[in-house]
Image: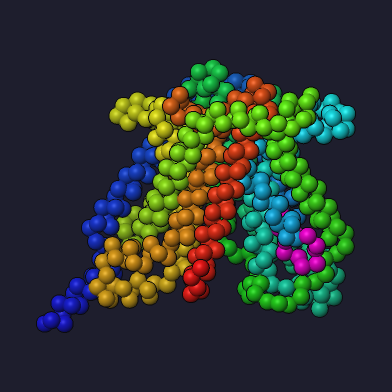
Amino acid sequence: MATQVIRGSANPRAKNGAVRIERSVTLLYLIVLALLVMFVVYPTLTVLRYPGLEDYADMLGRVRWQRAALNTVVITVLSTLSSTLVGFAFAFAATRRDIPGAKIFGLLSVLPLFAPPFMIAFAYILMFGRQGLISRHVLGLDLDIFGWHGLWLAQTIAFFPLASMILKGVLEGIHPSAEQAALTLGATEGAALRTVTLPLVMPGLIGSMLVTAITILADFGNAVVIAGNYPVLATEAWFMMEGLADLKGAAVVVGLLLVPAVSLFLVSRSLLGRRSYSTVTGRGSTMDQIKTPALLKWSVMAICSIVSGFVVLLYAGIVYAGLANTWGTDWSLTLRHWREALTYSDALWSSILIGLFAGALTAILGQIAAFLKSRHLPFRPLLDFLSVLPGALPGVFIGVGFVLAFNNPPVELAGTIWIVVLALGFWHLPLAYQATSSALDQIHRSIEDAARDLGASELRLVSDIYAPLLARSLMASFLQSFVRSVSNISVVVFLVAPGNVMVTFVILQMIGGTDWSGAAALTTFLLIITFLCIGLASLLAGRASTQSRGFQP
């Protein structure tokens, strides 16, 4: 009898063998679903139903909107193709053993990922504008870089790392034996790469193009700085709301922008989720790769070298502009702009505070949602869909959605920092959710089964097993969300109020007012915060790795 009691308490399973779900887990599941409905579904539906059919018809008939829609398609296609080409060159260089400088190229290729959304376009103006250091004062040229061509170059530099990261993983999954077999059958090195490597990498190439296109389609930061009189949908929404006070017009624009964004997101998720674009054996071998053809080798090195030079030049331009006395006329160095930047300490502190809260919300809610998805709960596909849905929503859509949804009772958040925290926290939710889901997949189910056999409840499972094993994922998700929140502009620009002005909005105003040195000084502060977070993350990851090997520092 005693044995039966012990088994009953230690093995919480139904007669069919399924694990019984505790009431606390069910309650938490309902709370998470309610939060997702409130802060993801509700703002989305609010944007879509706020305009009437006549508003959509009126907007579709406007010449400026038609021009903005066409411009958005054109620049998205151009920037996606160029970003993917450059990204492929960097990924190829990083995975071929006979291409020198791979580590340097790899380091420089990720730098644009850590830049504020508008920094590349701003730095491009500083270097190559009409008062640009390179164009005007070195080459003596009078260049007008505002427009589609400036936006194209800025977006190419800003977003090629996205394609490079995806393609690097794809190329690393191709076993050298496949290329060696082609040589054995009489193919040249070029033919082997064309007939073996390229077909294997093609699905990943298409997937990287889709992911890059989603980001470019919704790009606000670069477009608002350098597009000039070249309107695109992402900036039109802000101009309608800020300049014309046309909230319905802004809702129409972002609502229509949602259609291609979600479509691209679903296709990319389906394609990349298959992960069938590699050889069966994977890399995992010391077998030598075939020799890279000379023309291809030097072409890749030329592309990577030129783009790397641009990246270094743009970063250096931002730092130097913050130290120059008067950009364009007096190049002497001074700390005056840095001291003036400190007068915006309220905006800096507001940005850091919002970033901390948003990062914590993203990391904690993402981990809880991923954990609940691993339980045998009803409507799990709904939880999964709602947790990744914000990844398909452009930042301008999130901004307009929260303005419309939470500007009136019963939930009135406008003018507080909480509307920004919630908008950014839920927008970045897919980062933590997908990272935690991947980490959970690495935890063998037998660990949980053993704990259950010893009588562990769900709470003990979380506190004693999952929390320690997912600590690195939690910290990484928090830091990533914090960095992206502090440097965000596409969401923030719609939600700022006297009590929650963030530093990115201040920088945008400075750029518009041609206070370039002041804007560069504040941007440098953002870069310092970003790299401090990256250094902290690397330090924590190193300590965790050392401890996992049984060493204590």
How has the structure been colored for display?
rainbow
Observer-nearest of 8 and 187: 8
The relative height of residue 196 versus residue 531 in the rendered view (above or below) is below
Query: Is 99 covered by the magenta stretch?
Result: yes
Is residue 132 in view?
Answer: yes
Q: Is residue 398 visible?
A: no
Residue 158, image x and y in percent?
67, 43
- Answer above or below: position of 123 versus 284: above
Please indicate whether residue 524 sits to the left or right of residue 25 in the image: right
Residue 207 lies, in percent from the top left, at 62, 54
In this rendering, would 17 be left or right of 271?
A: left
501 or 349, which is in the foreground?
349
Q: Which residues are magenta?
A: 90-101
Image position, residue 23 (x, y; %): 22, 58
Q: Is residue 442 above or below residue 28?
A: below
Task: Tell whether 300 sits left or right of 376.
Answer: right
The residue at 37%/44% (across/down) is: 36
The N terminus lies in quadrant = bottom left
**Closer-to-camera residue (318/358):** 318
Instruction: Relative to 535, say whether 293 is above or below.
Output: below
Viewer-side residue, 139 vs 493 = 139
Residue at point 54% right, 43% down?
A: 484
**Which residue is at 29% across, 29% downward?**
410
- What is the number of callouts on the image? 0
